[in-house]
Structures are given as C-alpha cells and as structure tokens.
Image: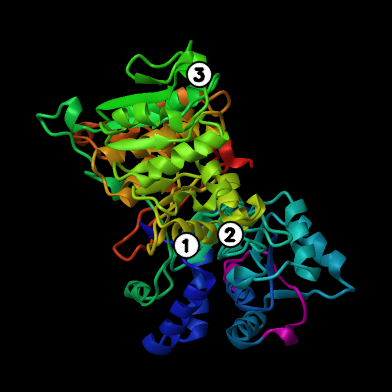
Amino acid sequence: MIALLTAAQMRALDAHTIEAVGLPGPVLMETAGRAVLHHLWAAYRDEALAGPVAVLCGKGNNGGDGFVVARCLHHLGCRVSAILLGSGEGVSGDAAVHLTAYRGSGGRLLEVSGRNRREAEARVSGAALAVDAILGTGLAAEVRGLPAEAISWLGAGACPVVSVDIPSGVCSDSGRILGAAVRADLTVTFGWPKRGHYLYPGAALRGRLEVAEIGIPPAALGRTSPGLWCLEEDDFGGGLVRAPDAHKGTLGHVVVLGGTAGKAGAPGLAAWGALRAGAGLATLAAPAAALHGARLPLEVMTEALGSAREGDGWDAGLWAQASLVLGRAGALVVGPGMGTAAGAGGFLSRLLAEEGAPVVLDADALNLLAGSPGLWAGRRRPMVLTPHPGEAGRLLGVSTADVQADRVGALHRLCSRYGCPVILKGAATLVGAPGEPAHLIPVGNPGMATAGTGDVLAGVVGAFLARGLEAAAACRLAAYAHGLAGDLAANEVGEEGLVASDLLAALPRALARLGSRREALRSDRSDLSDLSDRAGSSDRCGRPRRSARPPSHPTAHPEENP
C-alpha cells in the first residue's frame, strides 16, 4: 500500500526532518529542486536544451523549489527565465535563500507586475518547456489574481509542463480544482504522494507522477497516521484459495433479492457476478412476475416469490416464502431492480432485523434506507453499503456535489453513521470501515460507466462474504478485482461499447492476477503488466519506489449521477 498524505501531514514530516533530524530547510529545498531537475531532464532534456525554458515561481516554498530548478538549468547551459509572480521583496525564508542564489549565479529573473504581464505571458507562450512552481500543496482558497493569470498562460501554451509537488490550483487534500489549475505532463512530488494526486479531478491533471526522496527518514511516516492508502495488486496475494477437496457447498451461497417487472437483469448480473467471483451457488429471489420471461444465466438458480397474479412488488406478504431461501444463504445482496414502493421498505426492515447472513445493500435498498432513516436502527445482520455519489448524498442528507467535493470525508461519515463498511463508487473508488483508514482503488476506467457494472460489484462483494472473508477485506478485494476486470475488458474490447458482461468474463483473470487462486502462481503476468504501475510500488513505510501513472480518464460507474 502507498500512503497518501494531506498537506498538514507533509508539513509535519518536513518540520520533523528540519528540527529533529537536523537537516536545514534550505538543504531540503535544494534537494527537492534537484530531484525535479533529475526527472525533468530524463523526460524533456531535448526541450530544455532547445529552449527557452520558463520557470514560473510563486513567492512561497514552491517558488523556492522553482528557483533551484532554474539555477540548475542555467548551470547546464539552458536558456532559462525565472518568472517571479510579484516582487522579490515579498519572498522570504528558505525561498529567499534560493532566490538570492539564483540571482548570484547570473540567472535571468523577471519580476512580474502590472506593467510587464504581457512580457511574462510572451515568455511562457514562446517556451519550449515550462515549470509550474506557483502554488504547491499549501493552497486552501480559490486561485485569483496573478497566479490565476499565470495558470491560464500555461494552459494556452503548447509546450510540456512540469509541476513541482502538485499542479498549481489542485487542492492537495481533496483533488478539487480551486478556481483554476495547471494541466501537467509530469509532476514531481516529495517524500510521499498527496491525496490530490489520486483523487479526481486533480488526478487527471497530474500527468505522470514521480515521487522523489529528499532526505525525510522513511520511518518518520510512523509519526503521522495516514487516513488514506492506495491499494496495489501485491496487497491481495493469497486472499482466497480453493481447497483441493472444495465443492459448491463449501464455497458459499449468495442469495440476491431484487427485481421488478422489466428489471430482472440487474439482480441477475449481481448473481452472475457472485458466481464469477467464486461463489459455489447463487440464487435470485424475486417476485414471480419479475421473473416471468426474464433471461438469466443458466448457472443462476431462481426462487419465484408469490405468484404472477399478485404483481411484482415487494411487501411483507413475500416474507414467509423468502425466509426459506434466506436460511440457506452465506451472504445476501439486496436492492438491484427492487424499486422503492412502500412495501419494499417494510420487507427490508424485517430482513435487517433478523439475525443471519451478512447483507450487501445496493441500488434501491440504499434509496429505501435513505428515505427511512430508522429502517436500519434495529438491524441484527452485518451490513455493507455500496453507494454511488448520488446515493451517498441521499444517505448523508447532502448534495452529490458535496460528496464529490470531499469524497474521503463523505466515506468516513457514511461508515460512522451506519456502523458498517462502505464502498463509495466513482472515479477513484474508496473503501472504508468504522475506525479504519480509507483505501483508494487505483484501477478502473470510464468504459465502466454503463448499466449493470455496479450490480456486478455488489455480487462480487457478496461472494467474498459468503466465502468467509471479513467484511472490510471483502470490500477491498471486491472493489480492486472489479476495477481490474474493467481494465482487462477495456484492453480487449475498448472503453466505448464495454458492457457489464465484459467485466464478468474478465473477473476470473482479474482474480488470478490478484493471487486469489493457486493457479495464479503459474499465471501469465505479462498481460497488462503496466496496470499495477498506476499506483507505483512501495516499501515497508508506504513510500513509492517508482513512478505512478494515473488512468488516462477517471474511473466511472453507471450510478454516478443522482
């Protein structure tokens, strides 16, 4: 796993290195700037030598890093201009040390004021390479004034852009764009990645991410408590193994409750997802009218509740018959295609109040829960929630936009309010449990924004619960396997036109890659071998050892809209 830090946590580690380790601030800044130069030179040496190079510097520490980059490029013979957004008199602390060193080395400096903004803009537009050292990770308010103008200059240019620490304008803690933001081709950050490198929309602006060692002791991470970790393939080795004498009765029975007339496909996909995730048995229990004429996978058993003449609604009258099949379940998936009629709420309330197998609440079950806050108060079953942002907003009583503005915070509030593990779907899916750090899923793609992929995920969670995994672990494995299956499917059929059944076909290969079966020891790991690099590898302290590449587009799910 890779620790994803907040700006405050990174400041604390910097301060510890300066005060306790004894590494002076200007030395850390010099090391950081040279690390940026190293990666810049490896990626854009030709552009830097062809020149000119424009290094846009703010008045804070991010600008100080930029002065180091500009000085080193000057020493290498590049035609470089450091463009300071303001007056040199406004630069203080460690940044002032390196501004002085840049000036002393004979570097070219343009201090931008109202009179020469067009000159600064012209230098950026004529550059062969630009460095964004404007704002850094400490940004907490909307970008305005000269920094906003400078960001627009970079956006209008055609040259590659290298961002120092994080693209200026991206909130380091949430990934939000604060008014305006730089779109970088390469970002070099220090010590550990920040949350905004992996949370959208900021993640889409970072380009390739390089994480540089600048002298902060790896053990210092233990002084903070990262609340967000990025999962990697290696985190799942050996999670599930079939015993040599396994049979369908030992691999779990998932019962899916859902469906109304014309909507049997959603619970059918959940049941099929459970089988593709290794469950021994899967049963779809639905009103008889909902099953009439439905086309379901041959492997999925069905249980028709009531009669076709009684309609397709869910109500307490179906309970006696449903309870017979519920007693055979190792896990339940409730909600896909169920509808939100009044009787369905009563059925769900009774289901949760009974002791028994764990239940995954998805789709309409979540909407029922949101509409009747007391519905779950007397629950006796273990529970998992799998909302998309719109459903999460309804569960919390806030807007979808509020959820998206602080996805990690929304996840923690859901876990705390409902007292259970939660998978918050969407671009950069998050998984959490009460009292535990959140985990980010770095796999998946926008091709998954199609009907049914969320139903498949609910079924996969149900399978892992039925097979005996602890609930939070089941959620993490299910979310990662689901996203990885989406990437494998997109590699074969493309993102356009990808459908939920493509994920189902790819799930066994995704699970083999994650080491969940003994055959994984002999699997061909050359297929899509670069997918695991999206998150980068890490050492014992969670520090990435190599570059991390984000998906070219955000991960998406069909239920992202309210």
In what quadrant of the picture does the C terminus appear?
top right
Residue 205 among magenta residues: no
Front of the two marks 3 and 1? 3
Q: Which residue was labeled with disc 3? A: 310
Q: Which residue was labeled with disc 1? A: 193
Does the rendering let one see residue 508? no
Does the rendering let one see residue 92? yes
Sequence-earlier tag: 2 or 1: 1
Crowd class of label 1 (few under 14; some 14 to 19; many from 20; radius 10 Å) = many
Disc 2 residue type (three-letter): Asp
Disc 1 residue type (three-letter): Pro
Residue 385 percent across, percent down from the top left: 44, 46
Residue at 50% of width from left, 77% of height from top?
Answer: 11
Distance Cα–Cα, label 2 vs label 1? 18 Å
Give the residues in magenta: 69-91
Left or right, 273 with respect to 424, comes to left
Residue 406: image tag:
2
